[in-house]
Amino acid sequence: MRTQVAIIGGGPSGLLLSQLLNRAGISTVVLERKSRDYVLARIRAGVLETGLVNLLREAGAGARMDREGHLHDGCHLAQNGRMFRVDFKEACGKQVMVYGQTEVTRDLYDAQDAIGATVIHDAEDVALHDLTGSPYVTWTDATGTHRLDCDFVAGCDGFHGVSRQAIPDTVRTEFEKVYPFGWLGILSRTPPVEDELIYAAHDRGFALASMRNPQLSRYYIQVPLTDKVEDWSDEAFWTEFRARMPEDVAARLVTGPSIEKSIAPLRSFVSEPMRWGKLFLCGDAAHIVPPTGAKGLNLAASDVHYLYEGLTAHYRGDDRGIDAYSQRALARIWQAMRFSWSLTTMMHRFPGATDYERRMQDADLALLERSATARALLAENYTGLPY
Ligand code: APR
Ligand code: PHB
């Protein structure tokens, strides 16, 4: 089998890249280790920057998002019960789209079906070969071993994938920061407590009120890394969540049974470079951000944008885009890393923090409440830097 671009991983990065390339007349094959149902059962974040919204439309996968997604003009920040609003529209003229990543992935699968793209599921033991020469990919399934020859490989296989490991250690540098806490998240069929997201710093720990639609809420609380999901009954979650929200918000919270409950550790991670020979990394394969800034999926989208531009130009005879890919993608990634780190640092309670460090967090939040300049900086980063 032969294709122009072999794409490893059928998550949002791989599917979006495949969809855009196919529509530009460039052939792809997506190799995904799991089943489609498995991929679609993952619950992830749900705040889309304008750049991603536009890419989905360009990919012909934006219709349902435009019907069912919700544009938000701002969000709320709270500090020990005191709440104020950051008006994105006023601060930087931009908005974000609230629409679940699971729905984005579903729409991309439907769009791939509609154009007859090749997505191979349950591909085991994917291996990348001859990445600096004539690249090819091998994998196995119940019928045996298969080989796919290609011009390029796009490694869109997430943090635990194989693509990043195909870059030799001597070439690769990894940067990592692990935070000493996680987020316990629940999804519940209840009306969201507020029209916009609430990011709440509290002495008991951080909490976030988010949503998927008017009947579906997504809430999180900061928990120690040693906590297990089984330790948290729904009742215990709601009690703790309420305690971290401003009183009036807590009073109108509608609770109900959780339909999903999980704990995610917080980390920042970057692997450089993002290109080696004919291999390009996209999305979580190359970088992870803590969820506080809602940047994970959006960074995957900007990588896809740069790679899509680079590859389409390559097939027109211009290699400048693919040669600059790693540098362009990383410049934007480090800005989002900085933003996610600063928001995480400001909003969470760190075990062992000094009183001085606690006062700095309060001062950072007070600065945002007082200064339109500070809010503009937050809004510009939260709604997404231009590509
Ligand atoms: N072979 C084939 N597929 C693989 C392999 C492998 N060895 N390893 C992982 N995969 C698949 C996973 O099963 C998954 O479906 O690659 C896909 C990677 O998808 P994601 O982890 O969702 O990563 P990505 O597509 O880059 O999505 C962007 O940003 O912060 C996040 O939550 C956000 O998941 C989102 C991500
Ligand atoms: C979510 O809705 O799951 C969500 C929203 C914003 C974040 C993180 C997660 O910063």
Image (cartoon, grey):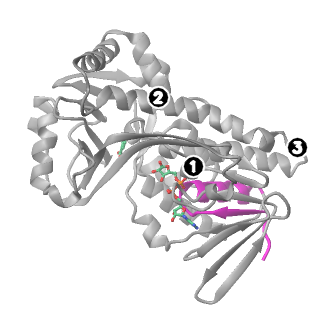
Q: Nearer the viewer, residue 260 or 283?
A: 283
Query: Which mark identifies residue 339?
Result: 2
State whether residue 63 appears in this view.
Answer: yes
What amino acid is found at the position of numbered circle 1 in the picture? Gly
* Range shown magenta: 1-24
Residue ID at (10%, 30%): 247
Q: Earlier in the sequence, mark 1 or mark 3?
A: 1
Query: Which mark identifies residue 318?
Result: 3
- The quarter holding residue 131 reads bottom right
Mark 1 Cα shell of 10 Å, populated few (<14), some (14-19), many (≥20): many
The quadrant of the picture showing ligand 2 is top left
Q: Position of residue 2 (x, y in %)?
A: 80, 72
Question: Is 114 placed left or right of 186 in the picture?
Answer: right
Residue ID at (37%, 37%): 292
- According to the image, label 1 marks what residue? 283
Mark 2 Cα shell of 10 Å, populated few (<14), some (14-19), many (≥20): many
Q: Earlier in the sequence, mark 3 or mark 2?
A: 3
Asked which secondary structure carries label 3, the reply is loop
Q: Earlier in the sequence, mark 1 or mark 2?
A: 1
- The quarter holding residue 75 reads top left
12 magenta-colored: yes
